Amino acid sequence: MTTAPDIAPFLEARQITVDFPGVRALDGVSFSVRNGEIHALVGENGAGKSTLIKVLAGIQPAGSYAGELVLEGRPVRFGSPRESAAAGIAVIHQELSLIPHLSAAENIFLGAEPRRAGFIVDFGAIQQNAERILRRLNATLDVAAPVSTFGIAAQQMVEIARAIRRENRLLILDEPTASLSERESRQLLALLRQLAGDGQAVVYISHRLDEVLAVADRITVLRDGKVVETGLREDWTRERLIAAMVGRKMTFTPLASSRRKGEAALRVRDVWAADPVSGKPVVDGVSFDLHSGEILGVAGLMGAGRTELALTIFGAWIGRWGGHIWLANRARPIRSISDAIEGGMALVPEDRRRHGLVMDFSVSDNLMLAHLPQYSTAGVVDEPTVRREGENIVRRLDIRTPALETIVKRLSGGNQQKVVAGKWLLGRPAVLILDEPARGIDVGAKFEMFQIIRRLADEGTAVLMISSELPEVLGTSDRVLVMRRGRVSAVLEGTDATPERIMEAAV
Ligand SMILES: Nc1ncnc2c1ncn2[C@@H]1O[C@H](COP(=O)(O)OP(=O)(O)OP(=O)(O)O)[C@@H](O)[C@H]1O
Ligand SMILES: [Mg+2]
């Protein structure tokens, strides 16, 4: 242990209570973080983690909650994020906050641009500094390109680089690794250890419990807005963490797989796609068959071309592309999104806030809108069925929402993700493409979601599932396709599909 118990905390929250309409998000929560310590915060979706972070960072301003904050022994009232930043607190939020048309370098130095002669923004210096910071993260990105051209993992790297560009006293990260691959996550965790070693305080939120157990000095579990327990790392095991999070013992049974495959529902031949900006190939000659009733996992590192492949197959790639994509039930190959949808294909996209939800619509509308024809007779919507199916998916995925009518914007990040997934699970598509379906979803709901995916496959859906979490890929898939630099580097099945073989093929 690097921290002795008698060291005064850097920042302390005492008896914090936060109320939203219909929900007590935090209920008398006390939490502290010391210099040089990594304090992990875990809990189910909707437990109150992000709300606590917002209090610590002044986003939930003093006056909007009961209780007090103490900074280095003195009571403090943050009226805005600016005030907490002045105290040396930096936050990486669950929702990305980049400005899409600005470059990575400009986003990293937003509001703190190095200037020449006092007023001219020095773009050369910005780019060099941005590259230097990204090197610490072992991330190679085109810092001059607009961030809107990046995938979500690269955007996350930019977000992290922005937070660490200056010396902080306290760095707070709300699920920073949710969209990162294992290797990128390891790199980030190593950097956090280094920052803590230099004396920074770190608060770390993650649903990846193995990471939490690997990196934290202390761990606090929140459940339903209350602290269940705070303890030193050595006092916790994975099982104890899960039990504390869900308030009951959970038993996982492996999902039965590898029953007989149906016919090829989707055939992909020599598909390629080019980056819309650089014109470089991001998918480079991919061929495979996807059978009905089969779950084909897609593994690979960030930048391997997995999301690009998914978008291309769905007819949604914005750059140039070519090759042949056939659905068994259509005579012509897929050329557009409407071809794909008419053929019964559905895509749960990686960037769900941007592509998957209407934030001002209710949970019910978000779940149902895409499927109204399925629930209508002669144009009249069968309301009772819609309601029953909606309630059913809310219960199965344990979507924490006051009501089906609640607007999606008011749900916690993980519960929003569940709504997007629920929407496609309801649709019973012929071919379902899932891009990181479990990102940001807690352990209990994750298991439930994979069971639903498994059941869809058993009912005949062909599933293509991209995921960076190997246990999830291996535990659910019948076969695993590994991508490296736009190409298929291996297709593994049965006893060949081990984490080692996958990593070998991915790097
Ligand atoms: N702006 C808001 N208006 C109304 N309710 C809110 C608002 N923000 C959060 N809540 C509610 O407060 C509770 C706690 O949400 P919070 O975002 O803190 O959860 P979380 O632990 O971060 O979950 P996740 O793992 O899903 O990110 C949830 O019930 C959520 O619906
Ligand atoms: Mg959250």
Image (spheres, helix red, strand yellow):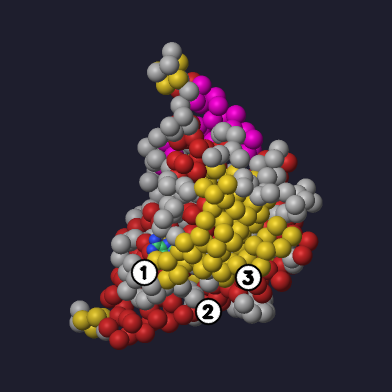
Give the residue pinned by disc 1.
21
* Residue 322 vertical placement versus 355 (above, below): above
**Picture coordinates of residue 472 (x, y %)?**
62, 65
Asked if the residue at label 1 sits under 8 Å from ligand 1, the reply is: yes
* Residue 409 vertical placement versus 487 (above, below): below
Numbered label tally: 3
Q: Are marks 3 and 1 in contact (CB under 8 Å)?
A: no
Q: Inspect the image, locate mark 3, and give the three-letter code of the amino acid beneath it.
A: Val
Q: Nearer the viewer, residue 231 or 143?
A: 231
In primary-sequence order, the first of circles 3 and 2 is 3
Q: Residues within 10 Å of mark 1 (few under 14, many from 20)?
A: few
* Residue 135 vertical placement versus 242 (above, below): above
Q: Nearer the viewer, residue 195 or 273?
A: 195
Give the residue pinned by disc 2.
455
**Residue at figure coordinates x 50%, y 40% from the top left:** 85
Pair 3/2: label in front: 3
Q: Nearer the viewer, residue 305 or 32?
A: 32
Q: Residue furthest top?
A: 117
**Real-space Cα distance between discs 2 and 1?**
36 Å
Give the residue pinned by disc 3.
228
